[in-house]
């Protein structure tokens, strides 16, 4: 039995194939975050730029409990990250959500950016980075490793991918076949008319914030491990860009396209690695993909210049 | 009546016991201030070691330290300040305290230029000590030279080791990487691969290439953009280039190296390659966090080990860190301590009023300054066109949660003409010959 020797744009297949596995594993985490962002956007019209920062802050709290509260069981300490994401996002949505409800999408988005910066400031204050000090939050699942196509992946990476798929399928079914899901879609279509029909809009939105927050906390927990160190600045922004690129590929609407988008972003980033001419620029892949997605989404938009506009 | 007398006796005994206890406790806590006393072969002190606070007009020393995502060089300044605080608590420089003014820079040449001018022209510092950056040496060395300033710092880029008015306490990433390469070649590496931050790779990595060429094995360099957000893919690239049995050198600080080390563990690749590193990860907290690398990570270590047995300077450094800083024992702390020690030595050696001219003359005249933190005495060496005083490293590795010595002091391989020339000067001018 001889393996077929061929190359992918000059890179031997044997060298190339492990990057596919690593790319899909990373892409699963991007997809997970992207789906969380789209669900919230669909229900509330808010593009949550604090998604990464909330997850990172939750992971930092879990790290602190794991390392400084020895009496607390590990599962509980890790669960705090998920709860933190849910509570903070829910509180933001309940307290500030209604105030922003009638504002333009840009204003709603800037509100979440403010939350991200506040959380980042708090993290810098209470847990400064640098000074040759590092934090590692490792999930027990990372100790289970498997060989696939020449790469080693761990159970956390598989879980991220599986969770992203389950979340996409589950949320799609939920939106189609449940009363609350129908309410979500109605609110997304027209909040005012939905309210006049007797749908408790605020309750619906609050539940969307809570659900998205729980996804955010879960993504934060998984990413803190997958990112290899708990670098909350990178978790707050670098991963947010990648997740936003995934969400934009889905047009901020389609969960399936977002899932695929996340996987594509992770895959592109990883498979560029063995190409020397572009390897240094591979981390910009999410930005490039996000720009392309934005151009694609806006391809049918017509700009009308009126006298007043001039 | 009897019971009253008994009570009085008991009370008196109690009071006496309390007094004795108070005196005893007081005596127990009255330990000598950190850095005070008389210097000897077994004891290092801060400055004059008087144990009394300096009160005169401050002597200003300045520093610029880089802070960017993934790399924090402010630690050197924090520790140098701690050392100067210790000097100030021990009589200062002839009664005058040192005022250490340091600014954070963010790898922006315009900012580096303006902050250097602020230090010299607005803050009126007499000297610059402690600078550490990817690029600041190149940006400002001409300006410092125009002002008659010789910088004592911890260097990274080529200019830090290639101009007449900058002298570093460390070997820097190029020579430390060469040392790491020597350690791996000695252990039979079949190839050499190095990953460095893209800002320094152009300077630091070719030295390893020369070691590989001398050993007749393949070499590859991977300039890396920071922060590293995909360590698994980046590591895979290094492993594919090295091939099994190859040597892979990580040239990163503890802000970035753990990402790779965790990925190495995740990929189950520890035993398939020889792992090396430059100095920054010779840190006990790293050794504790990564027990998987016990006896499997070989570090070109520019300084001695971080335990008290290393000698009096190391003991003083540990005491200064504990009292004056929040910095844990690490290589960057050793750099900051040495900056403080050598600067203080120059200030103490300054004749007459301390001015920019007199202090910097004293800096240039430093030679044969002994310290147990380095393999050989340190020097500046007046009128040399460049300075590489720290050109001897030890080999270090992790063992049982601590950094331990794997190889005794050894000369950094003279693959660069500058190292060979430096050793000629050292011999000719007797720059580091003190015992």
Image: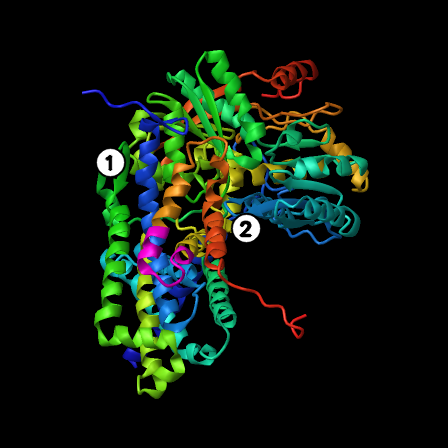
Which x, y percent locates residue B318?
A: 49, 42
Residue at 47% across / 30% down in the picture?
Answer: A276
Residues at marks 2 and 1, common chain?
no
- Chain under label 2? B
Q: What is the magenta segment's predominant secondary structure?
A: helix
In the image, residue A111 sits, relative to residue B75, either above or below, namely below
Residue span colored magenta: A247-261
Please state, as top left, top right, bottom left or bottom right, where the N terminus of chain B lies in the image.
Answer: bottom left
In the image, residue B12 sits, relative to residue A137, either above or below, namely below
Q: Is residue B183 left or right of residue A160?
A: right
Q: Residue B324 carries which label?
A: 2
Mark 1 closeness class: few <14, some 14–19, many ≥20 residues within 10 Å: few
Mark 2 closeness class: few <14, some 14–19, many ≥20 residues within 10 Å: some
Of residue A280 and residue B29, the one placed in the foreground of this image is A280
Q: Disc 2 vs disc 1: which is toward the camera?
A: 1
Residue that mark 1 sits on: A148
- Whether residue B348 is visible here, answered yes or no, is no
Q: Is residue A257 magenta?
A: yes
In the image, residue A203 sits, relative to residue B339, either above or below, namely below
Please state, as top left, top right, bottom left or bottom right, where the C terminus of chain B lies in the image.
Answer: top right
- Identify the coloring: rainbow
Q: In this view, does A269 lie to the left or right of A104?
A: left
Which x, y percent locates residue B350?
A: 76, 36
């Amino acid at each position: 039995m001889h393996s077929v020797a061929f190359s992918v744009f000059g890179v031997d297949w044997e060298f190339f194939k492990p990057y596919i596995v690593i790319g899909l594993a990373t892409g699963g985490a991007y997809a997970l975050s992207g789906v969380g962002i789209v669900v919230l956007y669909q229900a509330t019209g808010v593009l949550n730029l604090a998604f990464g920062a909330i997850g990172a802050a939750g992971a930092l709290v879990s790290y602190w409990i794991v390392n400084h509260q020895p009496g607390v069981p590990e599962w509980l300490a890790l669960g705090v990250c998920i709860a933190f994401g849910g509570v903070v996002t829910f509180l933001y949505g309940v307290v500030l959500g209604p105030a922003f409800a009638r504002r333009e999408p840009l204003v709603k988005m800037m509100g979440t950016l403010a939350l991200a910066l506040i959380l980042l400031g708090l993290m810098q204050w209470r847990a400064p980075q640098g000074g040759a000090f590092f934090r590692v939050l490792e999930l027990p699942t990372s100790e289970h490793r498997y060989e696939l196509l020449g790469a080693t992946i761990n159970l956390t990476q598989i879980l991220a991918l599986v969770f992203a798929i389950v979340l996409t399928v589950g949320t799609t079914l939920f939106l189609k076949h449940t009363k609350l899901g129908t309410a979500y879609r109605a609110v997304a279509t027209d909040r005012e008319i939905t309210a006049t029909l007797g749908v408790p809009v605020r309750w619906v939105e609050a539940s969307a914030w809570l659900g998205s927050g729980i996804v955010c906390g879960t993504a934060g927990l998984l990413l803190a491990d997958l990112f290899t160190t708990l670098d909350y600045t990178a978790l707050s922004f670098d991963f947010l860009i990648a997740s936003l690129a995934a969400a934009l590929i889905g047009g901020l609407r389609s969960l399936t396209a977002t899932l695929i988008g996340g996987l594509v972003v992770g895959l592109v980033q990883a498979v560029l690695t063995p190409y020397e001419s572009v390897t240094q620029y591979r981390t910009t892949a999410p930005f490039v993909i996000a720009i392309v997605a934005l151009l694609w989404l806006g391809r049918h938009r017509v700009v009308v210049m009126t006298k007043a506009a001039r | 009546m009897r019971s009253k007398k008994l009570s009085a006796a008991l009370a008196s005994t109690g009071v006496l016991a309390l007094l004795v206890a108070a005196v005893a406790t007081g005596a127990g806590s009255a330990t000598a201030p950190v850095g005070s006393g008389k210097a000897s072969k077994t004891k290092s002190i801060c400055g004059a070691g008087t144990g009394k606070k300096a009160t005169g007009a401050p002597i200003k020393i300045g520093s610029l330290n880089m802070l960017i995502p993934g790399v924090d060089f402010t630690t050197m300044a924090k520790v140098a300040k701690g050392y100067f605080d210790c000097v100030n608590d021990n009589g200062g420089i002839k009664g005058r305290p040192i005022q250490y003014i340091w600014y954070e820079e963010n790898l922006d040449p315009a900012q580096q230029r303006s902050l250097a001018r602020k230090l010299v022209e607005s803050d009126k510092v007499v000297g610059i000590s402690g600078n550490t950056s990817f690029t600041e040496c190149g940006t400002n060395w001409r300006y410092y030279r125009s002002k008659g300033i010789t910088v004592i710092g911890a260097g990274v880029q080529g200019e830090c080791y290639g101009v007449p008015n900058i002298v570093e306490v460390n070997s820097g990433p190029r020579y430390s990487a060469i040392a790491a390469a020597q350690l791996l070649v000695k252990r039979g590496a079949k190839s050499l691969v190095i990953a460095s931050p893209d800002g320094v790779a152009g300077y630091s990595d070719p030295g390893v290439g020369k070691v590989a060429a001398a050993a007749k094995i393949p070499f590859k360099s991977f300039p890396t953009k920071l922060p590293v957000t995909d360590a698994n893919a980046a590591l895979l690239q290094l492993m594919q280039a090295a091939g099994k049995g190859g040597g892979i050198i990580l040239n990163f600080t503890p802000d970035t190296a753990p990402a790779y080390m965790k990925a190495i563990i995740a990929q189950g690749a520890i035993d398939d390659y020889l792992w090396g590193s430059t100095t920054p990860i010779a840190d006990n907290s790293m050794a504790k966090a990564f027990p998987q690398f016990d006896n499997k990570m070989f570090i070109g270590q520019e300084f001695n080990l971080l335990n008290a047995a290393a000698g009096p300077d190391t003991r003083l450094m540990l005491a200064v860190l504990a009292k004056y800083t929040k910095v844990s024992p690490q290589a960057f702390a050793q750099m900051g301590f040495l900056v403080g020690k050598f600067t203080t030595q120059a200030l103490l050696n300054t004749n007459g009023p301390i001015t920019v001219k007199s202090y910097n003359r004293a800096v240039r005249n430093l030679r044969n300054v002994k310290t147990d933190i380095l393999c050989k005495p340190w020097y500046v060496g007046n009128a040399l066109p460049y300075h590489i005083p720290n050109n001897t490293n030890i080999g270090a590795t992790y063992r049982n949660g601590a950094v331990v010595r794997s190889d005794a002091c050894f000369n950094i391989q003279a693959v660069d003409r500058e190292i060979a020339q430096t050793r000629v000067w050292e011999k000719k001018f007797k720059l580091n010959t003190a015992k």
